[in-house]
Amino acid sequence: MIIGVIGNLPEVREENVNIKSITLAELESKVAKVSNEYEAVFIMKQYLEQAGEHQYAQVYRDIKIPVFFIESKKAHLPFG
């Protein structure tokens, strides 16, 4: 399992989980590629404000994998 992370990489103890750093720009410009290469994307707390910008709304609708907004205080589907 490969998880894309935007922000500081979390510590992972599971052997079958690999994490790779990606950027919001990569997510935006390569939605199909990200959907094919990763099982999920985590957007870490320090990027939540930027990730909430209007330009990313369509990305969250188009992506075919789950996107988790880590430590978000907003309601369900806050960025779509």
Image (spheres, grey):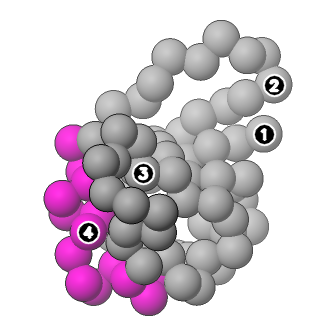
Q: Which numbered mark, 2 or 3, is in the foreground of this view?
A: 3
SS for callout 3: strand
Tags 4 and 3 touching, CB below 8 Å: no
How packed mark 4 is, by other alpha carbons closer than 10 Å (few <14, some 14-19, many 20 or more), is some
The magenta segment: 46-59
Q: Which numbered mark, 1 or 4, is in the foreground of this view?
A: 4
Q: Measuring 21% from the left and 75% from the top, which residue is drawn there?
A: 53
Q: Residue 52's mark?
A: 4
Cα gap from disc 2 to disc 1, whole angstroms: 6 Å
Q: Measuring 50% from the left and 16% from the top, which residue is drawn there?
A: 11
Q: Residue 69's mark?
A: 3
Q: Position of residue 78 (x, y in %)?
A: 37, 68
SS for callout 2: loop
Cα gap from disc 1 to disc 4, whole angstroms: 26 Å
How packed mark 3 is, by other alpha carbons closer than 10 Å (few <14, some 14-19, many 20 or more), is many
Q: Is 57 situated above or below 35?
A: below
Cα gap from disc 2 to disc 3, whole angstroms: 22 Å
Q: Which numbered mark, 4 or 2, is in the foreground of this view?
A: 4
How packed mark 2 is, by other alpha carbons closer than 10 Å (few <14, some 14-19, many 20 or more), is few
From the image, tell me which residue sits under label 2. Answer: 16
Q: Position of residue 16 (x, y in %)?
A: 81, 25
Q: Measuring 74% from the left and 67% from the top, which residue is drawn there?
A: 36
From the image, tell me which residue sits under label 1. Answer: 1
Q: Measuring 38% from the left and 83% from the top, which residue is drawn there?
A: 57
Which quadrant would the N terminus be assigned to in this image? top right
Tags 2 and 1 touching, CB below 8 Å: yes
Amino acid found under the numbered disc labelled 1: Met
Amino acid found under the numbered disc labelled 2: Asn
SS for callout 1: loop
Mark 1 or mark 4, earlier in chain: 1
* Main secondary structure of the magenta stretch: helix
